[in-house]
Structures are given as structure tokens and as C-alpha cells.
Image (cartoon, rainbow, N blue to C red):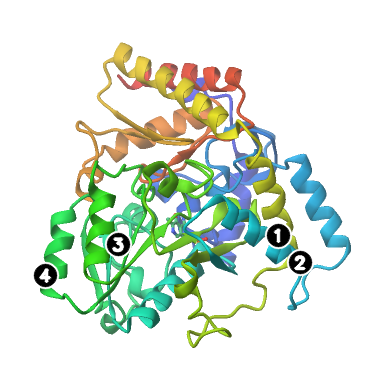
Amino acid sequence: ADADRTIRHPRSHALFEEAQTLLPGGVNSPVRAFRGVGGDPVFIDRAEGAYLYDVDGNRYLDYVQSWGPMILGHVYPSVLAAVEETARRGFSFGAPTQAESELAKLVIGSVPSVEMIRFVNSGTEATMSALRLARAYTGRSKIIKFSGCYHGHADMLLVQAGSGVATLGLPDSPGVPAEATAHTLTVAYNDANAVEQLFHTFPNDIAAIIVEPVAANMGLVLPQPGFLERLRELTQKYHALLIFDEVMTGFRVALGGMQQRMGITPDVTCFGKIIGGGLPVGAYGGRREVMQQVAPLGPMYQAGTLSGNPLAMAAGIATLQELRKPGQYEKLEQKSELLGEGITRVLHDTGINAQLQRIGAMFCLYFAQEPVTDYASAKRSDTALFSRYFWEMLARGVYLPPSQFEACFISLALEDAMLEETVQSVEFVLRQLA
Ligand code: PMP
């Protein structure tokens, strides 16, 4: 198979050698180092539309999309124009700007459960702040999370946190004091009975449930029918808040996120990725009465030097304006279906026992015998087989997330012919692996 490879990476290798002397693991975020697939990462030079170009001049169809934000494709003209125009008027002021209200209106107008919003700089900050808010609002300390869900790297959330941690096989991180996670209760994804049990045990102590309404940090695990509904019922019954972490799913599975698809109204929602159009942005928002706790309106402190900065707001506004045009999510759905049906046919034809799990413009191909419903079943995947698949796809110019436990993303820039080409690559590679 190696002999077939037309794509080579001498310059990436050289740059990685140097980077490893300067940055831990040569990267600024672990999954990028390709440890999950046992090789060196590709260094990217530039991107345009559906394509990434590496420093060796290779071109790839991009199914990572900077881990989600680039849903319009790279360097989308209206986003580029907005960022360029904004930059000329100043990079950051640390003072209010109209753009913050503009982006707020776009999010609030798309996600009815969000009546007020606070912008931050990352998904990590969004979830960390949302939990502080839930604790402030309820006066309670305990939180419930699900194993295999990742909500950023705040101490209290680094418990069975999926993706990067799963790939590295770290059960937890050193440096997190036991006290920091003492109030974090963890149960299996899709196990509403276990959640109910926790509420029976701690009826007055649980401030919030935080959940990825589609779990996209252990591959792609869909909520089973009734799961999210029961989380809503239980939180209402026990006066805890329901926090949807829609950092991945927000503006991806629908304009109004997974909550729109499910018809469920969380108390607080976390955003990231798409709402910043590729610049660093996160946000948390929700019911007015809850958001009124946030400083300076309320007593819960949370701040940020670069929060709401003009460049990030401009990229976010331009991105959401494009996504709000009629038909965009139908287009994404069609692209996802085209790819999904193609891969399903290939699985059938090659007899490879793998599970394609998919919703909206995101999917995961698990090299697993059974459908994946939680972290335990995700971990039964054949990661060695995934690695071979990953490298062969890369060699054919398809850039997939370098871990079995990450979701693949579809952008509007992927034309049907590109999706068909991807299916052909999947077919070629899976026939080799069969
Ligand atoms: N929540 C979810 C659901 C995520 O997928 C991520 C990152 N992939 C985060 C939170 C953390 O976001 P960030 O990396 O921007 O801190």
C-alpha cells in the first residue's frame, strides 16, 4: 500500500522535528499531534474552500474544518471581507462595540432558548462559566456529566473526558486536585436511569447537568430516543439547570442546534466554533433570569480582556449571516446524505464491519462490531484498523480527524463531485483493509 502513496511529507517532518523542541509534543493542542494514529502530523500552509494545502504542496479535502468552525469552507469571501475591513479599524479595544450586539442578535434570533448571551474566547471558557453560573443560580455544588463527553479542559470537567484524553489513554490528568472534581458526578451517556438515581441520592445538591446533545468527542454518539427528554424532566423536577454544550452541534446540525431538532429547551447553552467563523470565540447564553446573575448585572463574576473582540465578532457575524440564508441546512443535509449513502454502500459491498454514525453535517465511521451508544462501546473500536484507514485516506488526499474518537465535519464548500470522490477513496481503502 505504501508504494501507492503519491503524497509525501518531508517538509512537514522537518517542521515537526523543530516544533517538538519548542512546543510540548510539537503542538498547541494534543489531538493535532496525530498520536491517535501513530505518525507525524501534516503541517498546513493554507486553505481555500473545501481544501487544505500542506507545506509539501499536497492538497486535501478537509473533513476536520479546524475541528468544526469552517462550515462555509475556508476563506469564505464575505467572512474574509468582514475581517479585513474590521481589522483596518482596530484589532481590539476592550470597550463595547456594536458588533457584539449584532452577533448576540444573530444567536438569540436563531436559538429561542437563548435570551441573553455572554461572549468568551473558547468553548472551555463557555462551559466553565456556564457551570459557575448554574452553581451561582442554584446555590448548589454538584454537577453531572457523561463519560466520553468533552467540555473543555477546566479542572472540574477533566473526568472521563473523551477524545484527546481517550486517545492518549489518560484516565484523568495529573495536576487536577481531587477537590476540583469532588463535585463532578459522571455517568454513562444515554443512561437516564443512572441520572435519576443520582437525583434520588442528592435531591438538593445538583446544580446542573451538562451534556453534549450529540456526543462528538468520542466519535459521534447520538442521544437515544427519550434520553435528552428525561434529562429535561429530571432537571425540572429537582430544580437543577440543564446545560446543553452545543459547542459542536450549535449552528451545525441545524441553525438552532440540536435543541431545535429535538424540540427541547435547555436553561443554558454553550457555543463555540461556528459562531466565531474560525476566530477564537465561545459563548454561553440562556434564560434571561439566569443570565441576569452574570457580572456586572449580577454577582457571578466572569470576564475577559479579548472577549467580544471586533475581529472575532466580525467573522462570527459574517458566518451566521451566510448560514441564515434559506436552504443552507437542507444543502448540508443533502451533502451528508450523499456521503452517508455512499459509505453505507461501500460497507455493504466490502463486507467491512464498521458503523457509520451520522447526523446533519457530522459523521463518524467506527471500526466497531456493534452500534456505538456510549463511551464503553466507543472504546471497543479497532483503533489499529482506524489508523490504517486514516493514513490511506490521507495518502489519497482526504484529511480526516486523526483519531477514531473525533467526528468528521462536512462543509458547504464540499461539492457533490468531491463527496463522490471521497466515497471512491473510502471504497479503495476499505477494499485494501478487507
Ligand atoms: N465543548 C465541546 C462539546 C467541544 O467539542 C469542545 C472542543 N472540541 C469544547 C467544549 C472546548 O472548546 P475549546 O477547545 O474551544 O476550548
Q: Are marks 1 and 2 in contact (CB under 8 Å)?
A: yes
- Can you identify the residue that label 1 sits on? 102
- Residue 10, compared with residue 334, is above or below; it is below
The residue at 64%/54% (across/down) is 106
Give the number of the disc on residue 173: none
Q: CA distance from mark 3 to mark 2?
A: 44 Å
Three-letter code, disc 4: His
The residue at 56%/54% (across/down) is 273
Give the secondary structure at mark 3: loop
* Other residues around mark 2 within 10 Å, as few (<14) / some (14–19) / many (≥20): few
Three-letter code, disc 2: Gln
Q: Where residue 372 appears, x then y in whole percent?
A: 24, 39
Sequence order check: which comes first, mark 4 or mark 1?
Answer: 1
* Other residues around mark 3 within 10 Å, as few (<14) / some (14–19) / many (≥20): few
Give the number of the disc on residue 98: 2
- Can you identify the residue that label 3 sits on? 170
| Nearest-to-viewer mark from 3 and 2 | 2
Three-letter code, disc 1: Glu
Q: CA distance from mark 1 to mark 2?
A: 6 Å
